[in-house]
Image (spheres, helix red, strand yellow):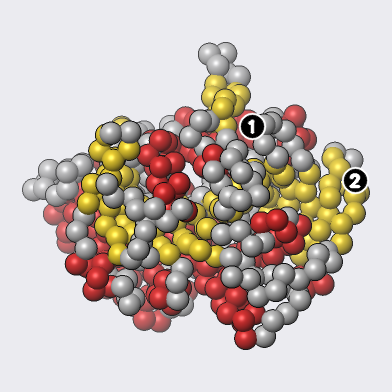
Amino acid sequence: MKFGAVLALLAYALPAVVGLPSMDAQQVLSMEDDVSTYEHVSHPAFAEYSLRLKKPTLCDDSVKQYSGYLDIAEDKHLFFWFFESRGSPSDDPLVMWLNGGPGCSSTTGLLFELGPCTINKTEDGTVFTSHNPHSWNQNVNVIFLDQPAMVGSSNKTAPVKTTPEAAKDVYAFLQLFVRRFDEYATRPFHIAAESYGGHYAPNIASIVHRKNKELIQAPSSDLLRINLQSIMLGNALTDPLIQMPSVVGYACDGPFAVFDRNSKECHTLRRRAPICERLIKTCYALDNRASCMPATVFCWGALWGVLDGANRNFYDVRMPCNRTENPLCYEEIDWVENYMNLPEVKKALGVDPRAPEYTACNMEMNQDFALQGDGMRNTKKLLTEIVDEGIRLLVYAGNVDMMCNYMGEAQWIEQLPSTHKDAFGEAPFLPWTVSDRPAGVVRSVGKGAGNITYLTVYEAGHMVPHDQPEAALDMLNKWIRNIPLAD
């Protein structure tokens, strides 16, 4: 398989306050390109950044919502869409949802997985949205952020090419967001990320946590403390050294194997996996483009090139998929693109006229990240300090996803260096039941929902909230309230 085609497979694999400073952000109303009226928010501490927003009524007009951009200089813009909770907005937590890729829009998560509305299409081809009773904003306030720049409705002339660079922009967005919406500044904040979000979320959380600690040592009116409480990673790529080779066991020996264990494909995979491991170890040791790029090229080409021959949906192996006809294997993704490109939708959301046509996944940006070897970096190492200092970690995985499979997820979280490692390793897997039906198994250490928790979700693929919406909502509600998931 061609390298570019292999990269296409990354589309989803690869989401106590120290004084509250006064709200001195500048807010004015102005016209932008004669399409809509925005409110503008800025602050001297983030001189290169400004937030512009408006109030649409799409998707769910029963709740307050905002959409707009984080503007960075003249040529860099991050699109967001925010929905207040259907429950008690002033009391409920704040969650930021991030899809992966790299290069995939969080608006697909909104319309295809867990947002207030779900994408649909009539027989004549008209796309529309319908109410989602299992939306995550049932009991939380949710931000859907298209990042890095060039993703979804975001745009930029010179692309961001690494996760750490992207994380700096997200931190600036969060600071301006909680300045404008100071009612959420002290609310518990959770970062939820899927797929390549296993790279995004640890980097973002690391910056937030570090800045919060700096504020304790040296309080400043220029920065707000963001009340980070937890990280939620769904079928996430976090530790490639463990996760990339794990696909061999999943594809050849697991309960959802796509090849016979004695097939030539499995022999080839077993022969190539150790080479992939050696290359990733070198990437981990040197942590630069020159060492990580070879791992990217070999591992994706040598392993996933073989797996492509199974003609299965990598994100749900129960389903066949012809990637020539549909690279992402879900027709609903096309519906999302059609909807987000409707002129009336773009106008209502205040989409920048300079933004290119909306695509669910920007493969140019995907390749930019791959050419930096970004996806082979170890982001697990960023979680140790965060978890040891009180930020809770939930890792959940649908069991029919091959791309970021549950076997690899369970392995890397068990090996996460932390003060909880030994206790977590000794913890049993316990049943998780939703509406009197088995929904999965959970392993946890710590009080309540746990300091570190791993959850396998039954009958779910890469996009757990899409495949098991009721179970995903149960998971979210218990996690944010720190209620044990196990029965």
Q: CA distance from mark 2 to mark 1?
A: 24 Å
> In screen coordinates, is 424 left or right of 271?
right
Residue drawn at point x = 58 percent, y = 65 percent: 227
Q: Is residue 204 visible to us here?
A: yes
Residue drawn at point x = 61 percent, y = 76 percent: 211
Q: Does residue 209 lie above or below 309 as drawn?
A: below
Residue 93 disc label = none
- Camera-near label (2 vs 1) is 1
Q: Earlier in the sequence, mark 2 or mark 1?
A: 2
Residue pointed to by mark 2: 31
* Residue 293 in the image, given as x and y percentages of width and height: 42, 69
Count of numbered circles in the view: 2
Q: CB under 8 Å between callouts 2 and 1?
A: no
Secondary structure, mark 2, is: strand
* Residue 367 in the image, given as x and y percentages of width and height: 51, 57
Residue pointed to by mark 1: 59
Q: Is residue 359 visible to us here?
A: no
Q: Does residue 183 lie above or below 48 as drawn?
A: above
Amino acid marked by disc 2: Met
Amino acid marked by disc 1: Cys
Secondary structure, mark 1, is: loop
Q: Residues within 10 Å of mark 2 (few under 14, many from 20)?
A: few
Residue drawn at point x = 22 percent, y = 51 percent: 430
Q: Does residue 109 lie above or below 406 as drawn?
A: above
> In screen coordinates, is 319 left or right of 429?
right
* Residue 398 in the image, given as x and y percentages of width and height: 32, 45
> In screen coordinates, is 314 left or right of 224?
left
